[in-house]
Image: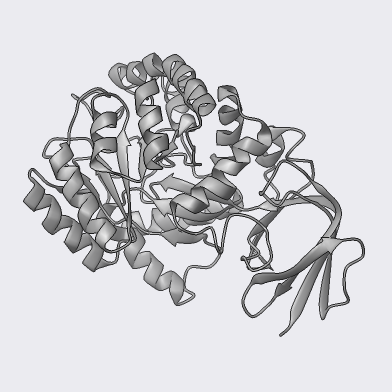
Amino acid sequence: MTVKTFKNFTLFDGTNDKNEQNAWFSVDTATGKLVDRGQGNGPDSAETVDLNGQYVMPGFINVHTHITSNPNTFDGGFNVSESEAAVFAFENLQTLLKSGVTYIRECGTSYDADIKLKKLQKQGMLPKTPHMMTSGRAFSMTGGHGDGPHAAFLVDSPDEMRKSVRQVLKNGAESIKMMATGGVMTPGDFMDDPQLSVAEMSTGVEEAHHKGVIVAAHAEGNPGIKNALDAGVDSIEHGFYLTKEEAEQAIKQGTYVTPTLIAEWTIPAFGKGVLPDWEVKKAEDALDDTYANFTRAFKQGVKFTCGTDAGTPFNGFDKTPDEFELLTKVGMTPAEAYHCSTQNSAALCGLQDDYGTLEVGKFADFQVLKADPLADVKNVKQEDKQVFLGGERQF
């Protein structure tokens, strides 16, 4: 075993709300996993990296991205060829990693591009890209949210859902994304429009869970949020109008909520005069309610994950660090905001034994910052941070 030791840094390992001063850890260069850690000078190793008193924290896990979308074209990625989608995806993956995101879960990808790209990634053909949990295309009803060319399986009955989920799992999807409500970007539907039914989603959940695969539901308003919870999904995506009763149901069922606050914030912040008025109004009208609902839900004990909906208008693939500042607006400390990624995102995706926190036995996926992330949540926005996968520097 060849060991590389990193020393002389302050460590936030993602497990609690404390820093460890004068920390070190050692990485097995063959496996990329931590084999030892401590405080002080550390052991002699074949290779030693002095981090010169900087700050180390885990890489982010972003559980809601759309890597084939372009946040500057505002079309949801529907109007591009498969070749263009693949190029966008590769560039977007590199941007995610550079921002500190070391693992993503896709939540709907045109052409099943993420599944195809992951095959290339395993062959070493996608350098400087984060680990991926693929989803392939999302699931929507005819005329529903995300009904665009090459973007979704359109299902209008439990039987159609069953067959389509089986097909995308056969294709190689590692997670499933369903549309329980209308959304901001689709003309003619609204956050409180119920779309896929409980029966349709329940069937998809059953098929996915048979294979040990998690299910996410786009659910912004009601009754769609309640429908998705009743169907047994593993995570509610967006959940802007989550009620007290639904929060209690989520806690009881162990359902996670991915707030995607940055996606909702960017549209009214940058979209006026650029995006259609109806699109800006939908996001702007919901924002104050969202903060109030999530503040209450966090106090109740709902487990929030880290996801940004990257690829939606003005919501670039470098924006994950901004999500943490918005999470503090619902009452979280910086450490609690980071735990949405290090602990909850990892647990939702079943990655907690290998990823998320910097503990012995887990992969050495981390970022190096010049300022303390626990002192100020804005410190994770550093643009020239160092980013490592398996103990190897990528940026």
Is residue 31 depicted above or below 210 in this figure? below
Residue 97, by quadrant, is: bottom right
- Would residue 264 appear left or right of 152 to someone viewing this image? right
Q: How is the image coloured?
A: one colour
Give the position of the N terminus as an image quadrant. bottom right
Residue 88 percent across, percent down from the top left:
40, 53
In this view, the residue in front, 231 or 287, is 231
Residue at x 50%, y 45% (from the top left corner): 317
Q: Is residue 383 visible?
A: yes
Q: Is residue 312 visible?
A: no
Residue at x 55%, y 24% (from the top left corner): 330
In this view, the residue in front, 235 or 393, is 235
Is residue 364 depicted above or below 282 in this figure? below
In this view, the residue in front, 136 or 241, is 241
Is residue 340 depicted above or below 124 in this figure? above
Furthest toward the front, the residue is 252
Residue at x 68%, y 68% (from the top left corner): 391
Is residue 159 depicted above or below 168 in this figure? above
Residue 89, by quadrant, is: bottom left
Residue at x 51%, y 53% (from the top left corner): 346
